Amino acid sequence: MKKTVFLLLFLFVFSFVNAQKKPLVNPAYKRMMYDMKVNFYTVCDSAEAYFKDRDKGKGSGYKPYLRWKFENESKYAPSGNRIVDHFMPYKEYLRIKKESKPTKEQRLFTTGGWKPLGPDNITNITGHYAAGLGRVEFVEVNKSDGNQIYIGSRSGGLWRTSDGGSTWSHNTDFLPASGVNAIAANPTNFNAVLINVRNAGNGTSFGVYKSTDGGATFSATNFTPANVGYGGLGSNFQVYTIQYHPNIPNLVFVGTSQGLYRSTDNLVTWTRQIIGGDVYDVDFHPTNNNIIYIYDGFNATNKNKVLKSTDMGVTYNGFVDLPGNANAKIKISISPTCPDCVYASSDNGIWKSTDAGLTYTTIQNPPPAGVALWQAMPNDLDTTKFVSGYVDLFRSEDSGATFSKCTWWSLGDANNGAGSNQQNYNTSPRYVHADTNYLDCVNGVFILVLMASYLNRPTMD
């Protein structure tokens, strides 16, 4: 009797599991999320219908959908209409500027009893075991003068230094949004710079703005929501990267959540070469101007590939999947010391091509125990040296074959010293804040951006 009951129970569970539908690579509700013409509640209905007969566990996409719903419902209720004025907050700011001086100053908080309460000092350890203030998203270093640097802050705009970080200037407070996450300086004129202006909270782009005077003043390029057809308040359109071709004047690439845009006239006009993808990374062959590498993390057939163009970015092909990558986001690195070498890294491994992206060999997969390979990349002048990491950093001096830990986020860790958190912060050469947001290497110097308003230049010593 017991065997019969157990068998029936097993058959019931087996039938239930097999009755669940298999997940789709690109379900309709995901496409609807990015189409602002689709009503918010129509997207929700589509998502709920999709998950009705599918697993809702880890990796299913159900939790990201619920986060999207929670974040957006208050914006569009009760109608669900997602077509809004992209520049509503900016227009309100302009309206306030026209008011009488006393009223305007009071509204803009320059007077009227408002005063800053902080925190305003990044070097003080108070109630936490690590310092931090805000977030840095991106860094652009002048390859001809390492003292000239732009950084983009998630909510604080663009900052520039001309003395290696001793002093900084900042002139983007009154652009339509406060965040800057993508920066591209003209390869022949560091004072000519393009930035993506975005919402600090959800990353929505308000367009690409340009400066010709080193960031002192800015004006909009033609790449704005009104002309692109995406972006602005109420949109999910994001710009991930802006890149000038290093040798072809005015050839600009913009990687976005709607694909890759290519301009031959410095964003006066453009064409969309990759449609509907999340193009996170764009890189260039050091000696062959026709070869360009990109990563598209949205289209299912591209998620495990580095795409390659041989016609200066007009068309792209993906030749091989990176074995074991399992759809993890890929970072591309190249080196002028090995022109045909391409390095690809992700949470799940490191791969190397020696034939300009046609084939790849595996350096690491899966990652060594306890080692984070997020943002892993080689030194651009000595590819035997690698840096990787997320919460803590790891280093390799044997071309990525082995890694050792080199930083400790917790100031109380013995590797940072035996003093107090504040004392260890002031003296430890092994402390950096957690969460590596961006890692680059320029002329043999690693540039590390952390999610706490830190810009670091670690050494391999």
Image (cartoon, helix red, strand yellow):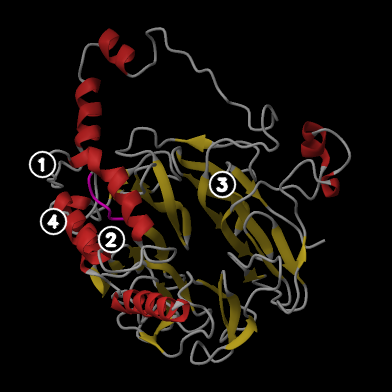
> Which mark is in front, 2 or 4?
4
Q: Nearer the viewer, residue 26 or 408?
A: 26
Residue 56 is a magenta residue:
no
Q: Which mark is residue 79?
A: 1
> Which mark is in front, 2 or 1?
1
Q: Amino acid at mark 3?
A: Met
Q: Which mark is residue 38?
A: 4
Q: Amino acid at mark 1?
A: Ser
Separation of disc 2 and disc 4 at Cα? 29 Å
Q: Residue at x 21, y 68 (%)?
A: 28
| Label 4 SS | loop
Number of residues whose C-alpha sits closer than 10 Å to that of mark 4, classed few (under 14), some (14–19) or many (20 or more): some
Separation of disc 4 and disc 1 at Cα? 12 Å
Question: Secondary structure of the magenta portion, mostly?
Answer: loop
Q: Earlier in the sequence, mark 1 or mark 3?
A: 1
Instruction: Work out whether 43 lies above or below 369.
Output: above
Separation of disc 3 and disc 2 at Cα? 30 Å
Separation of disc 1 and disc 3 at Cα? 37 Å
Q: Residue at x 34, y 76 (%)?
A: 12
Residue 225 image position (x, y, % from top left):
21, 51
Occupied quadrant, residue 281: bottom left
| Label 3 SS | loop
Q: Amino acid at mark 2?
A: Leu
| Label 1 SS | loop
Q: Residue at x 69, y 66 (%)?
A: 371
Residue under numbered circle 3: 451
Q: Amino acid at mark 4?
A: Val
Which residue range is magenta in the image? 234-238
Q: Quadrant of the N terminus?
A: bottom left
Q: Which mark is residue 267?
A: 2
Q: Is residue 179 left or right of residue 208?
A: right
Number of residues whose C-alpha sits closer than 10 Å to that of mark 2, classed few (under 14), some (14–19) or many (20 or more): many
